[in-house]
Image (tube, rainbow, N blue to C red):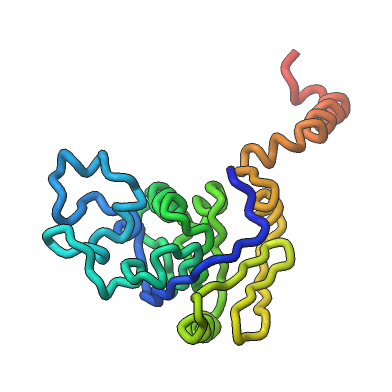
Amino acid sequence: MEKFTSLNGVAAPMLMVNINTDLLAPSLVPGKDLVDIPLIPLKDKMFANLRYDASGAEKPEFVLNQQRYRAARVLLAGPNFGCGSSRETAVWALMEYGIRCVIAPSFGDIFHDNAFQNGLLPIKLEMDQIRRIAEAIDRSNNAEMTVDLERGLIEVPGMQPIHFHIPEDRRVPLLQGLDQLSFILSSQADITEFELKHAEAEPWLYPV
């Protein structure tokens, strides 16, 4: 998994409520035959029902179809982002597109866990803060911002730095580029030492 330390890039405002996993990783794609859909890259399926019209042509009003936001690395969203089904492809689609961070007031629980397992950083901020970030991005020349996980800071042109908190058991694996299993295995020596001492102290718990 790719490490996440500090990210600088374009932030796209998509301040909708309840952006669900079916929007993020849809089963159907407008203008495409069913037999062709499995061959379409996830990044091109992402938000397909918002990005494309019935013929499969891009909708110019959709934020990620606008030249200013096509190269987005950060997504600014509304409450309950990633709600709905448990499909992990919702995270994969964002990552394949190039988005490494989603900032929203709240997230679907399973999406939230899947994000950390795949190297996507979900940050929780109040909606008022997110709107102010979106307004500052709209005023800036290049729509870029910086997310610094090491310092827990978001830096946006024209704004004071914004602090965010990620629990250490989530933050450290991202900084090191480890999924949950790899993070646990990095403590293998400590685990083995504990097991040996525990077996010595309470041998009746262990089969001969």
Q: Where is residue 38 in the image (x, y as percent from the top left)?
A: 25, 40
Q: Which residue is drawn at 34% across and 48% down?
A: 42
Q: Residue furthest top?
A: 208
Q: Residue at x 29, y 52 (%)?
A: 45
Left or right: residue 27 versus residue 173 is: left
User: Can residue 199 be spotted in the picture?
Assistant: yes
Q: Residue at x 41, y 54 (%)?
A: 97
The quarter of the picture where the C terminus appears is: top right
Q: Position of residue 180 (x, y in %)?
A: 62, 43
Q: Residue at x 26, y 59 (%)?
A: 48
Q: Nearer the viewer, residue 17 or 155?
A: 155
Check the image and report above or below for 197 versus 103. above
Q: Which of 124 and 68 is in front in this view?
A: 68
Q: In which quarter of the image is residue 125?
A: bottom right
Q: In which quarter of the image is residue 19?
A: bottom left
Q: How many labels does the image show?
A: 0
The quarter of the picture where the N terminus appears is: top right
Q: Where is residue 118 in the image (x, y as percent from the top left)?
A: 53, 47
User: Can residue 86 be spotted in the picture?
Assistant: no
Q: In which quarter of the image is residue 56?
A: bottom left
Check the image and report above or below for 1 versus 126. above
Left or right: residue 111 versus residue 58 is: right
